[in-house]
Image (cartoon, grey):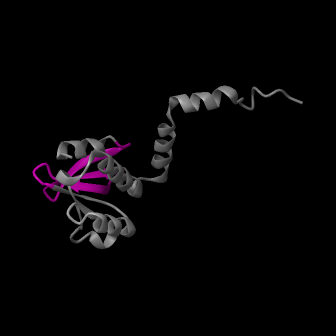
Amino acid sequence: MTYREFRRLCLALPEAEEIETWGEATFRVKARIFAIGSPEGRTVSLKASLDDQAGLVAMDPKTFAVAAYTGRFGWVNVSLTRLGPELGARLVRNAWERTAPRRLIRDGETRKLGADTLGRRRAGARSKAEEPRR
């Protein structure tokens, strides 16, 4: 995965924004950081749970490492050159979900269902106004 692909994944999430801090790009949702990276760097840092961090480092210590300073909170450093696109997308999404307000997460899950699913569900449903009175 390239930094450009990583950046695109981060900014594709609802209300995500990029702000330069400490000489690096920080990716935030509602002013809270979920990822950090630099176009010149080969690694990025992602917010994770302590359990996920331990599992990732145990699974592939050449790709994942406990982040300096923030590692005690679950943050993990990720080598972009060793990261595949599917796992990268899942890790970015998980980092965003750990940071975003619940309202945004619920809205995102609704969008995941897709227009077809929602359309089918609504087609057979009646609103209270449409229901016949007994």
Residue 61 percent coordinates (x, y): 23, 66
Count all numbered tags in the image, as a single digit. 0
Question: Which residue does the image show at 46% across and 48% down from the upper left?
Answer: 105
Q: Nearer the viewer, residue 64 or 118?
A: 64
Magenta span has 104? no
Whether residue 104 sits left or right of residue 61 in the image: it is right
User: Residue 11, percent across and down?
Assistant: 29, 43
Looking at the picture, tell me which residue is in the foreground, 18 or 60.
Answer: 60
Please say if 58 is above or below 41. below
**Residue positioned 38% across, 42% down in the render:** 14
Instruction: Decide whether residue 24 is among the magenta residues.
Output: yes
Q: Residue furthest left?
A: 40
Determine which quarter of the picture holds residue 48: bottom left
> Residue 91's x, y, as percent?
33, 53
Which residue is outermost to the bottom?
Answer: 72
The residue sitting at 29% across, 50% down in the picture is 88
Q: Image quadrant for the C terminus? A: top right
Give the farthest residue toward the front: 59
Q: Nearer the viewer, residue 16 or 72?
A: 72
- Find residue 35 and report its image quarter: bottom left
Q: Position of residue 21 (x, y in %)?
A: 18, 56
Residue 74 appears in view? no
Question: Is residue 70 in view from this perspective?
Answer: yes
Magenta span covers which residues?
A: 13-42
Q: Main secondary structure of the magenta part?
A: strand
